[in-house]
Structures are given as structure tokens and as C-alpha cells.
């Protein structure tokens, strides 16, 4: 029986949708809240409000400094409301409370960072070779932004879009995922409280095939910022054939973590375990392919097995829990299928590979390690599982490690563990991925760009340049 109710936030008001759907608590498998399913008409109202706010009214008239102050206030409000937001994200997605709390602290940092940058993003003067002419370049907001996010880390994945978009002076319609939208619909209350003018930020949820489709193909949308899966990304690119919106895509990964025999093996093992099992493996940067030097493979696998089996699985709201359920039953069924196919094709189960006992009803899956036995064609080695499954491949030489690391169409993140500085630099040069973490994994900062190579996406989020991606330059020629 659903108890909580949520609304969409359109043109400065919280509004019901004509249709609703139930949101499932993944730790129990039961419906706990009723969510509004935005229709195409709701999307149209939100985009038109964003377009009006962009062209006239208080947002359009606001100085960059004033916009920056609003963003900083929003960051402060996120942090002040961290417990509520974290509790909702945990309830609606099953991500453990430890992780949702930690992530919300840096969500606040992203809004403050882009708030601080809003009035430091400058235009330029071009010294052209004409004595009677001057040219200035004005960076102007690109227009209405359609931001579309997946269910994992929605507060974070929207901060990396809203922060630079609003700092640049754009207006936004943000679509929360239909799986676990509660934290973003609650975040809309903070946008309202911070004082963003009506229409500047609109937040709604609904299904991809109708509301997402309408939003990303809407003629008044000039910019699409998408995070999600590769199949949806291709559909979104087709949608933007309608409006020719400038589009960035943050997609999936099959990130390699390379462990050389000379590494600090205990610290590497901790990083590998956190790299794959944090967020129950439902993370775009999950280090899902372990490449380990053959001479230490058995010893390293024994450490990993021990650590994986010690992970406390349980109620995601309990601060002592170290791994929660998967977010949807669809996810669990897919993981089970890929694991079964990989074992049938010759993979060796080191640990896990089953639903853990004692958690009936919840969408749990045990931390799983599969030794690929040198078969890099196994489905668990090739496909993004988006779950707690680590595939292990041995290598004998550095060149082989590099070739294996790059043996994927993805290229989002990677890790290298070694005490040899030159080797670390060579690997960092050679790996085809947007991030290389050396002797660490999963570090993030608003100051640092993030994004993928190949099938992992297009464009970068985070860092100074992200604001540029939400502006278009205007060249102004003046005869003097
Ligand atoms: P998804 O692609 O199914 O959905 C993402 C969003 O797109 C949802 O809001 C959905 O409603 C919307 N959508 C679906 N169809 C649409 C359409 N036709 N038009 C417009 N919008 C549509 O992804 P998911 O299963 O929710 O999330 C998992 C994926 O996200 C994984 O592949 C993961 O790697 C990726 N991801 C990437 C990053 C990154 O930063 N690179 C971060 C987190 C997750």
C-alpha cells in the first residue's frame, strides 16, 4: 500500500499529473510511494515555462553574480537537508544510507562550485587586424536545457548538469528517472526555497518512451544533457534530430582495474572491492574487470574472496549495512542471466553467484567474483552488468595488461595499482578512458572533468569547461 505522495514541479508550482505510478522499495519489494507520471502536455508546459523564463522575467534579468548566489544557497540547502534527501534516496533506490549521505555532501559542493564560477566565466576581446573595428565575444546561455538522469545517484547526476547550466544562465527541465524519483522531487522543494524564479528550474518524472521522448525532441529545447544507458542514448540522439539540440552523453562502462605484482596488494584489494561492490555495483564507474598479474593472481583472489564474503548485506537504512539490494527486479534478472551464461561458458565462480539467504522479498544479490579463466569472450567480461559482479583476467606482461584494458568498446574509468612510477605513467598514457585512477579508485571532485571515450559517451561534466558547454558565443563587430 503506497503512503507517500510526490508531485512534479513546473513553472514554480508543485502540480499533480493526470496519471500516477507506484514506486517500489527495493529492500522489501513493496510499493511505498505514489509518483506523478508526467504526460507530454506536462512536458510542454515545463519547457514553455523554461523558455519564458529564459527570455523575460526575473531570471533573464538576473546578473551572473545573483545567479551564483542562488546556486550557493541551493548547495547549502542540500547539505542542511542531507538526512531527508539521503533517507529518500535510500528508500526509493535501495542504495545504502552510508553512501547516499556521503554523496549528498559533495552534491552540495558541486552547486557551490558552479555558484562561485557563475560570474567568473568571461567573454573576450579579439585584436583583429582592422584599425576601425573592434570585436568582442559574448558567452550567452545556450537556451532551454533538457536534463535526463538514470535512477542511480540522481541527486549527483543532476547537480553536474544543473550547476553549470544555471551558472551559464540557462533554464532547465530535469527529468528524474521513473525508478526512484523521490530524492529529486523532494530536491525541487529546495530549489523553490532557495528562490529560483518560476520556470528557471522545472523537475518532473515520468516514463522515458513518452515524457522523456517529448522532452528531448521538444522544439524549444536547445541542449540535452543525458546520463543513462547506451541504447537510450542512441534513441535520444534520434530524438534530437527533431530539435538539433547540442547533446552530451554520459553512458555506461566496463572499467578495468589493473593490479601489478609490485602493488601494495592489501590496499589494492580494498580499492577493487569498493570499486565493484559500492552501490551494489550499480555505478557507471564500477571497476568490473580486474586484470591481475598472473604471479599474484591466486594470492590476490584469496584476499578478494575473504573481503567480499565479509561484506555486511542488509537493510539499506541501517548505517552498519555495507551492501544493499539492487534497485529493480529487472536488474537482478539480467545479472542472473549473464552470470549463468558466463559460468556455462567456462567461467569459475570464486564466490557469490546467488541471492543471499535471509533477505526474502528484497532484491538482493551476493557479491560475486568470476574467474574468466583467460576467456575474454565471456558475457560477464564483455557486458556492463550494472551489478555486484567482478570478472577476473590474468596477464603476464605490461603490454598485455594494456591491450586487455583497452579490449572493450567502453572507456569511462580505469584503475592502475603499482609502485612503479614510470609504469603507472605509461599505463595512464595508454588507457582509452576518460579517467585513470592510480593507486586509488572512485575519487571525484567538482574541479575535475569527467566523461567517457568510445561507447561511454560524448562530452565532459565537471570542471571549469562544463560551463562553456552550456553557452554559445556571440561575436559582436563594432565599427568605431
Ligand atoms: P536508462 O538509459 O534506461 O534511463 C536513463 C533515463 O533515460 C531515465 O530517466 C529514462 O526514463 C530516460 N529515457 C528512457 N528512454 C528514453 C527515451 N526514449 N527518450 C528520452 N529519455 C528516455 O538507464 P538506467 O537503466 O536508468 O541507468 C543505468 C545506465 O546509466 C547504465 O548504463 C549506467 O552505466 C549509466 N550511467 C552512466 C553514468 C555516467 O556518468 N557515465 C552514471 C550513472 C549511470
Image: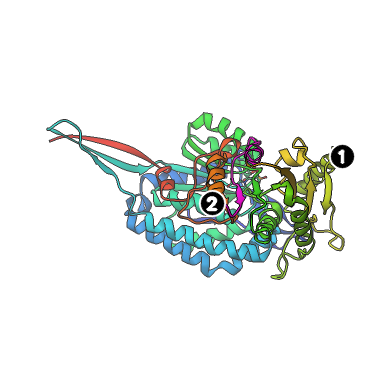
In which quadrant of the rendered image does the C terminus lie? top left
Percent x, y of residue 384: 70, 42
**In the image, residue 236 lies at what x, y percent?**
58, 35
Q: Residue 421 bears which disc, if any?
A: 2
**Residue at horizontal 66%, vertical 43%?**
254
Q: Is residue 445 left or right of residue 387?
A: left
Q: Residue at x 73, y 44 (%)?
A: 394
Magenta range is: 399-420
Foreground mark, 1 or 2? 2
The reply to whether the C-beta atoms of the residues labelled 1 and 2 are less than 8 Å apart is no
x, y percentage for residue 404?
Answer: 67, 38
Image quarter for ligand 1: top right
Question: Eyeballing the image, is 63 above or below 77?
Answer: above
Q: Nearer the viewer, residue 15 or 319?
A: 319
Q: Looking at the image, can residue 328 be seen? A: no
Q: Quadrant of residue 72?
A: bottom left
Label 1: few (<14), some (14–19) or many (≥20) C-alpha neighbours in 10 Å: few
The scheme the figure's colours follow is rainbow
> What residue sits right under mark 1 in the picture?
344
Q: Which mark is residue 192?
A: none
Q: Position of residue 456 (x, y in %)?
A: 59, 39
Amino acid at each position: 500500500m503506497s503512503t507517500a505522495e510526490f508531485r512534479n514541479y513546473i513553472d514554480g508550482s508543485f502540480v499533480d499529473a493526470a496519471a500516477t505510478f507506484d514506486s517500489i522499495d527495493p529492500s522489501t519489494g513493496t510499493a511505498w510511494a505514489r509518483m506523478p507520471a508526467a504526460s507530454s502536455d506536462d512536458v510542454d508546459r515545463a519547457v514553455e515555462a523554461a523558455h519564458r523564463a529564459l527570455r523575460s522575467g526575473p531570471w533573464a534579468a538576473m546578473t551572473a553574480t545573483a545567479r551564483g548566489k542562488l546556486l550557493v544557497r541551493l548547495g547549502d540547502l542540500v547539505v542542511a537537508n542531507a538526512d531527508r534527501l539521503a533517507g529518500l534516496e535510500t528508500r526509493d533506490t535501495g542504495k545504502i544510507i552510508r553512501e547516499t549521505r556521503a554523496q549528498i555532501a559533495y552534491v552540495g559542493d558541486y552547486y557551490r562550485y558552479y555558484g562561485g564560477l557563475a560570474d567568473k566565466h568571461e567573454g573576450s576581446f579579439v585584436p583583429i587586424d582592422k584599425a576601425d573595428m573592434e570585436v568582442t565575444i559574448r558567452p550567452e546561455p545556450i537556451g532551454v536545457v533538457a536534463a535526463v538522469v538514470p535512477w542511480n545517484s540522481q541527486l549527483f547526476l543532476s547537480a553536474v548538469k544543473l550547476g553549470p547550466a544555471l551558472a551559464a544562465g540557462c533554464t532547465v527541465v530535469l527529468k528524474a528517472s521513473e525508478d526512484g524519483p523521490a530524492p529529486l522531487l523532494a530536491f525541487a522543494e529546495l530549489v523553490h526555497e532557495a528562490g529560483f524564479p518560476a520556470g528557471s528550474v522545472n523537475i518532473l518524472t515520468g516514463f522515458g518512451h513518452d515524457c522523456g521522448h517529448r522532452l528531448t525532441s521538444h522544439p524549444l529545447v536547445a541542449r540535452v544533457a543525458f546520463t543513462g544507458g547506451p541504447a537510450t542514448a542512441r534513441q535520444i540522439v534520434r530524438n534530437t534530430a527533431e530539435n538539433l539540440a547540442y547533446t552530451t552523453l554520459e553512458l555506461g562502462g566496463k572499467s578495468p582495474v589493473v593490479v601489478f605484482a609490485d602493488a601494495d596488494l592489501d590496499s589494492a584489494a580494498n580499492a577493487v572491492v569498493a570499486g565493484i561492490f559500492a552501490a551494489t555495483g550499480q555505478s557507471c564507474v564500477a571497476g568490473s574487470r580486474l586484470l591481475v598479474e598472473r604471479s599474484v593472481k591466486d594470492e590476490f583472489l584469496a584476499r578478494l574472496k575473504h573481503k567480499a564474503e565479509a561484506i555486511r548485506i542488509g537493510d539499506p537504512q541501517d548505517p552498519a549495512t555495507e551492501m544493499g539490494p539492487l534497485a529493480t527486479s529487472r536488474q537482478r534478472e539480467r545479472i542472473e542471466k549473464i552470470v549463468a551464461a558466463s559460468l556455462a561458458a567456462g567461467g569459475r565462480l570464486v564466490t557469490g553467484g546467488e541471492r543471499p539467504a535471509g533477505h526474502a522479498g528484497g532484491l538482493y544479490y551476493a557479491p560475486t567474483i568470476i574467474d574468466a579463466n583467460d576467456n575474454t569472450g565471456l558475457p560477464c567480461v564483455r557486458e556492463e552488468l550494472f551489478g555486484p559482479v567482478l570478472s577476473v583476467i590474468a596477464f603476464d606482461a605490461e603490454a598485455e595488461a594494456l591491450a586487455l584494458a583497452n579490449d572493450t568498446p567502453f572507456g569511462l574509468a580505469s584503475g592502475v595499482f603499482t609502485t612503479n612510477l614510470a609504469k603507472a605513467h605509461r599505463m595512464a598514457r595508454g588507457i582509452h578512458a576518460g579517467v585513470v585512477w592510480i593507486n586509488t579508485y572512485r575519487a571525484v571532485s567538482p574541479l575535475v572533468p569527467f566523461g567517457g571515450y568510445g561507447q561511454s559517451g560524448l562530452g565532459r561534466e565537471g570542471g571549469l569547461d562544463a560551463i562553456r558547454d552550456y553557452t554559445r558565443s556571440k561575436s559582436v563587430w563594432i565599427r568605431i
